[in-house]
Amino acid sequence: MDLAVGTNLDRFVIIVYFVIVMGFGAYFGKYSKTTSDYFFGGRRFSWWLITISIVATGIGSHSFVKYSTKAYQYGFSSTMTYMNDWFFMPLFMFGWLPIIYYTRVGSIPEYFEKRFNKTARSLATLMILVYMIGYIAIQFLTLATALYRIYGIPLMATVVIIAVATTIYMHFGGQTSVIFTDLFQGLILIFSGLLLFFLGLNYLADHTALGGLQAFWQNLTPDQKLPLAHFNHPPDFNFVGIFWQDGIAGSVGFLFLNQGLIMRFMAARSVNEGRKAAAFNVLLVLPISAIVVSNAGWIGRAIANAVPGALPAGMEGNDVFVAVTNVVSSPGVFGFIIAALCAALMSTADTLVNASSAIIVNDVYRPLTKKKTNDKEQLKIARFTSIGVKVIAVILVPFFNSFDSIYEAHGWFHSTFTPPLVVAVFLGIFWKRFTTPAVIATFVLGAALMILGQFFPELVKPFSHGIELRPGRGYYYIGALYNIVVCAGVGVIVSLFTEPEPKEKLKGLTLSDVNSLREIFKGSKPNDRLGEKVTVFWKLIDSDKNIVRFSKHEMDKMAAEVGDLVYVSDSRKWLGGLKSIHSVYGEPHEEEGIIYISEEQLGHGQFVKDRSLIAEKEM
Amino acid sequence: MLDFSRTWLPFLYLYGVGGIAFIVGIMLILRTKALNKEIAHHRIWLKVLYFGFGFYITLHAVFILLALGSS
C-alpha cells in the first residue's frame, strides 16, 4: 500500500525531537568518569528513575508496529506478552538480582565463568552478542521503515542517520546518559501512546452518535475484548504457543539474560531499590505499556467497524500504526507521535549498544589482552566499541529486511537464541548440581537438537498442544517448549553423569547462598542495627582513600561503625541519586554536621557547594 | 465462537502452569532464606509477591467476564 503521510510540520517536529535528545544525552556525559560509571552509572540511582527508564528500554520501535498489528487483528489479546511476567518475580527479586548485584559481575558471561569456566563464558558471550547486535539491527530497520516514508530518504541512508544520531549521545555519556535520556523518552512514550488513545476516542465520538469510550467498546466484538487468545488456533497467534515462547522463555530471557536490563538494575543504588523498580515495572508500568503499544490497533479496529472506509483499503498489517495515527491526529501531533516511535528506537538501541560494549570490554577485551590497561583507556575502548557495534548492526539490516515481516524476523531471533541461554542461566542459579560439562552440552548439543527440530517438525509435534502444522514453515511459537525441553534434558542428564562442582567454587553464585551475599559484598559482617539518616554539609580534605568521615554524634545517629558502608546523596530527591556516592565510614571527627570527603569523591558525586547532603548507612 | 478454548482454558493454563512456576519460586526463596520472614521488609515483599499474582488473576478474570457479558 502506498501511504502518503506527514506534513513539513511533522518532519520539523521529528528533527527537533532528535536534536533535543542528542543534547540531553551529551549533557549527562560529564557523569561518566570511569568504566563503572559508563556501564553501571556508578550504582547510585533511585528506583523510580530506573523504572521509567526501563519502560523506554522495554518498548522498542518494533513494539508499536508489531502489537498494533496484532491488536488490529485480534483485539485485547495483543496484551498477553505484557501481562505474563509476574511468575518469575520471586526468583528474580530474591535470587538473581542479589547475586548479580553483590557479586559485582560486569556482565552475564562473567557470571558464567565464575559459576562454570572460561569455555562457558566464551559460548555465552558469543550467543548474547549475536542476539543483542541482531536486536539492534531490527530496531534500526523498524524505525527506518517508518521514517523513510515520511522523509523520502532511501531506507539504508535512514538507517545510517539513526545510527549516527544515537551514537552522539551514547559515545560521550554511557549508562548515565542512557538512563536520563530514557527517563525523558519513557515519559514521552507513555504520554504519546495515551494521547493517541485519547485522539482515537475523540475521533470515534465525532464520527458516531455515541461517546468515545462507548463507541470504542461497542465497536469491538466480544472475541476482540478477550484478554487471552484462543488456546491453540490459529498457528500464527495462539495462547499456548505464545505462553511458552514469551511467558516462559521470553520472561526468563528478559529478566535474567537481557544484559541491558540487568545493567539498569545494577545502576540502582541498592538491591532493595532494584526490587522496587522491578515490582513497580511489572505491576503498573507493563499494563500501561500494553495499552501504549496496542491501542492504535484497537482504535483502528473500532474505526474500521464504526466508520467503514475511514482507513485505507487493503491496509497491510505493518501499516496499522502509521495509518491510524495519520487518521486520528492533526499535523504536528502526527510528527510528535512518530517522534515517540523514534524515542522507542533510540532508547532500546542505546541500552543494547551500551550492554554490547560492556560485554565486549568485559568478556572479550579484558580476558584477551595481556597488556594491563588503566580505566581511562578501557573507557575509551568502550566508547569506540559502541560505534563498532552500531556499524555491525547497520550491516545486518539488509539480512533482516529479507524476512517477510519484522514480526517474523523478531520471532526467529527470539526462538533461536534464547532457550539455551535461558536453561543454562536458570539451572546455574537454582540447581547446585548443574555442572560445567552440562552447561557446555546445553549450549552445543541443545542447540544441535534445536536445529534438528527446525528441519524435522515431527520432533516438535508431541509438544504442539494441537496447534496446526503449517507446511514448509514448521511450528512457530510452540517450538520454544521443544527447545526448552531438549536443552534442559541435555543439561540435567549430563549433570547426573558428571562430577558435582566443589562447594567452595559455587560460593555466592547460587540461590542457596543468597543470604550470605551481603557479607561477601561488604567483606565483613553487615551491621543491621537500625539508624537514622543525617543531613550534613561537605568539606574537602586531602585523602586518596575511599572513605568519608562524620562526627561521632552523627555516626551514633546512623548506628554506624568504622568500616561500614555508607551512601551519600544530594538532598534534592528529584535528582534520583544522580549526585551521590557510595563509600566507607572512616574514623569519626569532632565537627558536627560536616562530612569530610576527598577531591575524587567530590568529582564523582558532582556535589554542589553549600548544598546539604543526606547520608545513610547501607550495611 | 466463544467456546471454552477461547475463554477459560487459556486462563486456567496460564495460572495453572504459570502458578506452578510462581509457587516453586516462592518455596525456593523461603527454603533457602533468600527471603527471610524474620526481616520486616522481607515480610512486606512476600505480601507484594502474593498481591501481584492475585492482581493479574483478577485483571484477566474481570476482562473475560466483561467480554462474555457483552456477547
Image (tube, coloured by chain):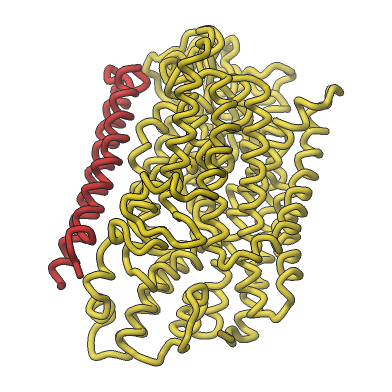
Chain that appears red: B
Relative placement, left or right, of A299 versus A399 is: left
* Res. A562 in view: no
- Quadrant, the N terminus of chain B: bottom left
- Quadrant, the C terminus of chain B: bottom left
The image position of residue A391, as x and y in percent, is 77, 54
- Image quarter of residue A369: top right
Pick the residue in front: A435 or A41.
Answer: A435
Relative placement, left or right, of A522 versus A18 is: left
The image position of residue A488, as x and y in percent, is 45, 31
> Taking A322 as reference, is A205 above or below it?
below
Pick the residue in front: A586 or B31.
Answer: B31
Residue extending furthest right? Answer: A371
Residue extending furthest left? Answer: B69
> Taking A168 as reference, is A515 above or below it?
above
Chain that appears yellow: A
- Image quarter of residue A362: top right
* Res. A335 in view: yes
The residue at the point 69 percent across, 66 percent down is A19
Relative placement, left or right, of A544 versus B69 is: right
Pick the residue in front: A124 or A376.
Answer: A124
> Taking A288 as reference, is A155 above or below it?
below
The residue at the point 13 percent across, 68 percent down is B69
The residue at the point 21 percent across, 71 percent down is A222
Total marks drawn? Answer: 0
The residue at the point 45 percent across, 13 percent down is A516
The image position of residue A326, as x and y in percent, is 50, 82
